[in-house]
């Protein structure tokens, strides 16, 4: 049996056949001419046929889709018939350019023109670029880019997934996610947990498997096996039963001895928030506002932002909602805020720092939040991402005060913020630990890189120490400020116990993980959680920290987590 070890990032045991995510379409060489035997008429006809095929395929997919996905597919299908695009390409072909190069260049001109028009039109620019890549794929006879479509459910295998891929990922069709790259804090991991799909990342070599290969995916152990045996078939059946037990959170995060640990949800917009409320989340611990505007070329208006924020607040009347101001940059670029040419985006102008280079956007966002809060019943807390110093925290707090926001806070995801938590927390009312970035920065390991997955885990004793230091800083003499965790660490039931033992007050995670975290938390007392935190801190490595703690939590094995 062929085995591919990786890092398990979302539990679940499942058997299915795989489909590979096609590689991105490469640019046809500049100056590529029609080949000797092909006439301009033949090339134009081939281009038209390819564009027609792309149109028909997208239209057929739109017919079986619903909601936002349907609208995106319909708009993209229309673009494949766009006369400006096809005529532009036709002219280039008439001058001797190859069909692939012609559609590539014509697509670039149309996208640029739409971009310059701004507003709604500017947003169609990405549809044009998507369509031109699909037409080139059709001309080359290779699979279209993006998540493959299929009539039957499959296990998606990819190099890695970006946040934008979620728009076209149909959770009814995808059984599990497996990536050759990606780390435990990568967006693939986040997407998988939010959809409740078993997932394994950093499984080198899986990208060489043929479509249709049957595999067993173990999202807890972190492995993929080709040609599953009887034991694996039984494990997949047992998981199907367990999964339904783990689907319901009773809305009460607590240890065995009644120490309350509110379990909150991470959301990216109104729909997500409604779903999280339906799963009994006790509030929202992280509203990633940039997720509302990932496709935008231009800054959304104050009114548009206020409507997006209010849709989340309205899902949680009377409950806490922690909104994070735009965290643009690195793996979540927003064209109106970030510079795509930065050499080192994770260390660049991202998160709160975009206020240095694009002043005004944060101020207007705070106005929009205040506007949305005014007629909402949620208990709104507002925090800034990527705060590194107490001065930045003080500046953010003053901006919040100016906008009429009363409860400013910060994310602690840069090691300097953890080390100086005491002075930072003198400036603001609360902190939320972003363990995804805290880990990547503490370990100097890009969270998106598969080969660094073993460094890039919040089980690293260095990361746990930074969490402990932040809690200590929050309790320093003269103040006692709440500290939550909203990174993926909170969604790992064993780590959730450790974080509770380290003194964290709230845990925020994808709503799908609430039930599993609550189930395990209920099996330990606070004193036992504190013992397990000590054990993890004393471990010489992340592997041992994880193994030692897991060994003391029998509920994990019983529940298949
Ligand atoms: C984090 O860094 O842990 C976090 C919650 O923010 P994001 O994953 O959106 O960067
Ligand atoms: Mg972060």
Image: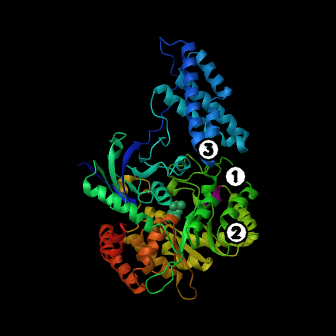
Which label's residue is closer to the chain start, 2 or 3? 3
Instruction: Please state the horizontal and vertical placement of residue 492, each as a whole percent of the image.
Output: 42, 68
Task: Write down the region rendered in magenta.
Answer: 352-357
Q: Which residue is pictured at 64% across the width and 53% down the height?
A: 293
Dot 3: what SS? helix
Q: Which residue is pictured at 37% across the width and 40% down the height?
A: 211
Q: Which mark is residue 399?
A: 2
Q: Quadrant of residue 287?
A: bottom right
Instruction: Please state the horizontal and vertical placement of residue 383, each as a whole percent of the image.
Output: 61, 69
Q: Is residue 386 something one can see in this rendering?
A: no
Distance, label 2 to label 3, CA atoms, is: 40 Å
For the residue pair 37 and 22, the one nearer the viewer reads as: 22
Category of crowding for the residue at label 2, using alpha-carbon neighbours closer than 10 angstroms: few (below 14), some (14–19), many (at least 20) = some
For the C terminus, give its image quadrant: bottom left
Instruction: Please state the horizontal and vertical placement of residue 45, each as a whole percent of the image.
Output: 57, 18
Dot 1: what SS? loop
Distance, label 1 to label 3, CA atoms, is: 25 Å
Instruction: Please state the horizontal and vertical placement of residue 371, each as a whole percent of the image.
Output: 75, 66
Residue with the mark numbered 3: 70
Distance, label 2 to label 1, CA atoms, is: 19 Å
Residue with the mark numbered 1: 299
CB of mark 2 within 8 Å of CB of mark 1?
Answer: no
Category of crowding for the residue at label 1, using alpha-carbon neighbours closer than 10 angstroms: few (below 14), some (14–19), many (at least 20) = some
User: Residue 42 colored magenta?
Assistant: no
């Amino acid at each position: 049996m062929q085995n591919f070890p990786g890092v398990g990032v979302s539990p679940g045991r499942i058997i299915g056949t795989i489909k590979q995510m096609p590689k991105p379409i490469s640019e046809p060489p500049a100056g590529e001419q029609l080949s000797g035997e092909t006439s301009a008429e033949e090339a134009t006809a081939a281009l038209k046929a390819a564009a027609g095929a792309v149109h028909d395929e997208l239209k057929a997919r739109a017919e079986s889709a619903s909601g936002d996905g349907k609208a995106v597919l319909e708009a993209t299908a229309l673009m494949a018939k766009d006369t400006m695009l096809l005529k532009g390409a036709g002219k280039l072909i008439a001058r001797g350019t190859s069909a692939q190069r012609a559609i590539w260049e014509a697509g670039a001109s149309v996208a640029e023109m739409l971009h310059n028009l701004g507003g709604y039109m500017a947003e169609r620019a990405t549809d044009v670029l998507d369509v031109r890549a699909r037409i080139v794929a059709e001309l080359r006879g290779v699979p279209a880019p993006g998540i493959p479509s299929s009539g039957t459910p499959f296990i998606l295998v990819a190099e890695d997934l970006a946040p934008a891929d979620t728009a076209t990922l149909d959770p009814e069709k995808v059984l599990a996610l497996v990536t050759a790259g990606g780390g435990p804090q990568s967006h693939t991991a986040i997407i998988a947990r939010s959809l409740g799909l078993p997932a394994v990342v950093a499984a080198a070599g899986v990208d060489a498997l043929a479509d249709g290969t049957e595999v067993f995916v173990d999202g807890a152990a972190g492995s993929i096996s080709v040609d599953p045996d009887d034991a694996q078939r039984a494990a997949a059946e047992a998981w199907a039963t367990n999964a339904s037990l783990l689907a319901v959170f009773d809305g009460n995060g607590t240890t065995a001895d009644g120490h309350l640990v509110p379990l909150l949800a991470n959301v990216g917009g109104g729909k997500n928030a409604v779903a999280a409320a339906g799963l009994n989340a006790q509030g929202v611990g992280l509203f990633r506002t940039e997720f509302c505007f990932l496709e935008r070329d231009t800054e959304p208006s104050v009114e548009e932002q206020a409507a997006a924020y209010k849709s989340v607040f309205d899902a949680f009347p009377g409950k806490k909602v922690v909104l994070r101001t735009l965290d643009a940059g690195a793996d979540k670029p927003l064209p109106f805020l970030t510079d795509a040419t930065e050499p080192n985006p994770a260390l660049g102008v991202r998160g709160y720092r975009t206020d240095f280079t694009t002043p005004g956007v944060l101020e207007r966002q705070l106005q929009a939040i205040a506007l949305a809060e005014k007629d909402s019943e949620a208990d709104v807390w507002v925090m800034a991402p990527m705060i590194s110093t107490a001065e930045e925290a003080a500046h953010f707090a003053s901006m919040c005060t100016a906008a009429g926001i009363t409860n400013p806070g910060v994310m602690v995801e840069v090691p300097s913020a953890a080390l100086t938590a005491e002075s930072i927390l003198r400036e603001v009312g609360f902190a939320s630990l972003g363990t995804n970035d805290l880990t990547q920065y503490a370990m100097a390991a890009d969270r998106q890189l598969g080969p660094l997955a073993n460094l890039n885990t919040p089980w690293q004793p260095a990361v746990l120490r930074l969490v402990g230091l932040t809690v200590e800083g929050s309790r320093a003499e003269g103040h006692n400020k709440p500290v939550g965790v909203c990174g993926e660490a909170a969604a790992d039931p064993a780590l959730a116990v450790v974080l509770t033992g380290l003194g964290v007050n709230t845990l925020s995670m994808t709503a799908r993980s609430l039930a599993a975290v609550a189930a395990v938390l209920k099996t330990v007392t606070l004193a036992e959680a504190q013992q397990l935190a000590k054990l993890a801190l004393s471990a010489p490595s992340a592997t041992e920290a994880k193994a030692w703690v897991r060994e003391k939590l029998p509920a994990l094995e019983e529940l298949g987590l």
